[in-house]
Image (cartoon, rainbow, N blue to C red):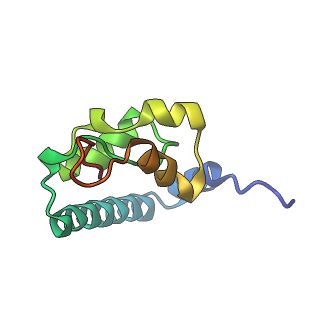
Amino acid sequence: MGRPAEVGARLARYARSHPDRAARARTLLEEARTSLAGRTLEEAGVPPGKVTRATHVVSGGERYLQAVLQPIGIDPCLGMLDFGRDVGHLGVSDHVPLSTTFWRPAGSTGETMA
């Protein structure tokens, strides 16, 4: 079924060949991700301090969670790395099992997910 994409290796080669461009691309990605998450929380009327659990891509580790959650004011400890370690990375579907596992109907004593 084709050949593996080897995304990590390709990114590493690009970063070695074009370090300035790679650094700028990373910065732009981080800024866009942080801006989108902040706007989403604001539109939902949920201050970061009210979030009790946060879904995320489960292929990352603790450094990834720090990079994603800390800039928007959410404690990285509220991520779901333990759950993700059990199921593994599910691609773009990561958020679905994370959300449905911990989701509670509005008005219940459930958690505030981000």
Front residue (pair 103, 58): 103
Q: Residue at x 33, y 47 (%)?
A: 104
Q: Residue at x 58, y 54 (%)?
A: 91
Locate residue 75, reporting x and y percent. Answer: 22, 38
Residue 81 shown left or right of residue 12 in the figure:
left
Q: Residue at x 26, y 60 (%)?
A: 34
> 19 above or below 68?
below
> 42 above or below 62?
below
| Number of numbered markers | 0
Q: Residue at x 51, y 48 (%)?
A: 97
Front residue (pair 94, 76): 94
Front residue (pair 85, 70): 85
> 85 above or below 15?
above
Locate residue 7, reporting x and y percent. Answer: 63, 54
Front residue (pair 41, 61): 41
- Image quadrant occupied by the N terminus: bottom right
Locate residue 2, reporting x and y percent. Answer: 85, 61
Locate residue 36, reporting x and y percent. Answer: 28, 67
Residue 107 shown left or right of residue 113 in the figure:
left
